[in-house]
Image: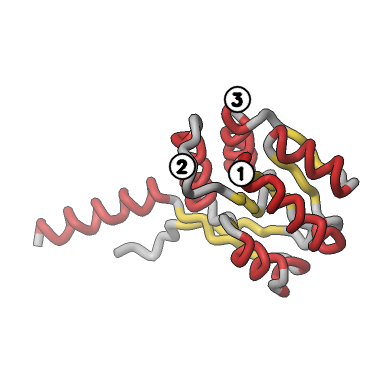
Amino acid sequence: MSDEKDFKIVQMQKQKSIALIAHDNRKQDIIAWVKQNKEKLGKHFLCGTGTTATLLAAETELPITAFNSGPLGGDQQIGCRIVEGNIDFMIFFWDPLASQPHDPDVKALLRIAALYDIPVATNQSTADFLISSPLMDQEYNRKIIDYAKRIKLRTKAFNENREM
């Protein structure tokens, strides 16, 4: 196998860009959680899908950029910003028991977060662990795997082994 790297390092700044998302049955939960963590979250840039961001801004008086509602493309807008490097972190209180009309969008958003090595909390316990991490107030180097390069390197190594 080649010494060629199949990943890149992207530095996350001390001040994070955090997406806040919640399904309808979890909106009150995320509001309560943000209120509990208002001081910590207030140090970062916040955004969220339409209704969630609007409710959070009204209830907490934190500045939160609102994108479209999830079913109207908000999940995709956040995914796009992750790809562009403009969102570092995601808190997504999802409802695992309710069918959502935009489930494919949610799955795509979670896949993009995994591809771009974004910390994601899908419940309060994980959100508590992430927000209390010392890494919240530090720079952090994310390791983003270049999957296309990884496949190419594996194919090359496979072909070289076949020729032996």
Tell me the kind of residue under disc 3: Leu
Question: In this rendering, would 134 be left or right of 145?
Answer: right
> Dot 2 corresponds to which residue?
107
The disc label shown at residue 72, or none: 3
- Which one is nearer the viewer's eye here, 102 or 86? 102
Q: Reading the chain from its start, which is encountered first: label 2 or label 1? A: 1
> Dot 1 corresponds to which residue?
25
Residue 127 in which image quadrant: bottom right
- Which one is nearer the viewer's eye here, 18 or 23? 23
Q: Reading the chain from its start, which is encountered first: label 1 or label 3? A: 1
Q: Residue at x 46, y 55 (%)?
A: 145
Cα separation, mark 3 vs mark 2, equals 15 Å
Residue 27 in which image quadrant: top right
Give the residue at the far bottom of this rendering: 134
Cα separation, mark 2 vs mark 1, equals 18 Å
Residue 76, horizontal then vertical, whole percent: 57, 33
Dot 2 crowding, Cα within 10 Å, few <14, some 14–19, many 20+: few
Tell me the kind of residue under disc 2: Lys
Residue 120, horizontal then vertical, whole percent: 58, 56
- Which one is nearer the viewer's eye here, 58 or 104? 58
Tell me the kind of residue under disc 1: Asn
**SS class, disc 2:** helix
